[in-house]
Amino acid sequence: MALRQIRIMGDEMLEKVCRPVKEMTPKLRQLVQDMLDTMYDAGGVGLAAPQVGILKRIVVIDIDEEGNNPLVLVNPELLESSGEQTGQEGCLSLPGQAGMVTRPNHVKIRAFDENMQEFELEAEDLLARAICHELDHLEGIMYVRHVEGELFEVTEEGEEEEATGRQS
Ligand code: ZN
């Protein structure tokens, strides 16, 4: 298991637009694995490559409580979005804080997996939120840009976090 250092808000890597992946290489495969390890280690539900300092359009997500349902999105593209959900959102690049963000409640995306097989995916609720959050990272956008009202502190462990979801 190889953990990568998560960049914290203010780091310029988090403000850049990421480049598409042209082909899957051993190096990028390792990156995907490291991103999954890093996300699980940090207790997050998603991580984008720029958060570990790599400006490639790669995202990992796992909203499963047990972390048994990893989703790898390479070159993801939003095809459709509809509805609205407003809820608490956090980010591994801004630990200990959260804010209220309105996102689409339903999204449809097209992406490639770690073997560069193209697929489409429809998602709702937390998964739709996580996808929107991570796709924003690929455009250099932190969720704080969408926050309604003030950011607030959240505890690392405890009831608030349990009730409202982990950070991505
Ligand atoms: Zn984030």
Image: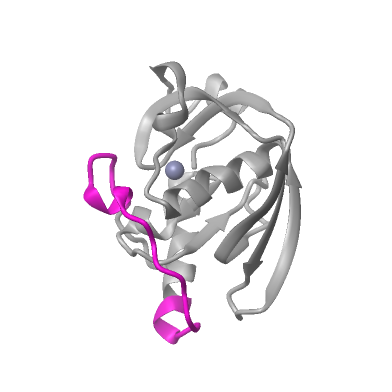
On the image, the x and y values in percent for residue 1 come to 42, 68
Dividing the picture into quadrants, the one containing residue 121 is bottom right
Q: Is residue 142 left or right of residue 117?
A: left
Q: Position of residue 23 (x, y in %)?
A: 49, 84
Query: Going by the image, does 17 lie left or right of 35?
Result: left
Residue 45 spot, x, y in % from top left: 55, 45
Q: Is residue 116 above or below residue 89?
A: below
- Residue 31 picture quarter: bottom left
Closer to the camera in the image, 82 or 168: 82
Viewer-proximal residue, 125 or 138? 138
Q: Foreground: 163 or 115?
A: 115
| Picture layout, residue 3 above or below residue 139 | below
Here the colouring is: one colour
State ligand 1's quadrant: top left
Residue 97 placed where, x, y %? 39, 26
The total number of labels drawn is: 0
Residue located 23% across and 40% down the image: 10
Residue drawn at the location 60% of the way across and 79% of the way down: 116
State the extent of the magenta-drawn residues as a range.
Answer: 6-29
Between 60 and 131, the one lying in front of the other is 131
Q: Is residue 166 magenta?
A: no
Judge left or right: residue 114 versus residue 49: right
Q: Main secondary structure of the magenta part?
A: loop
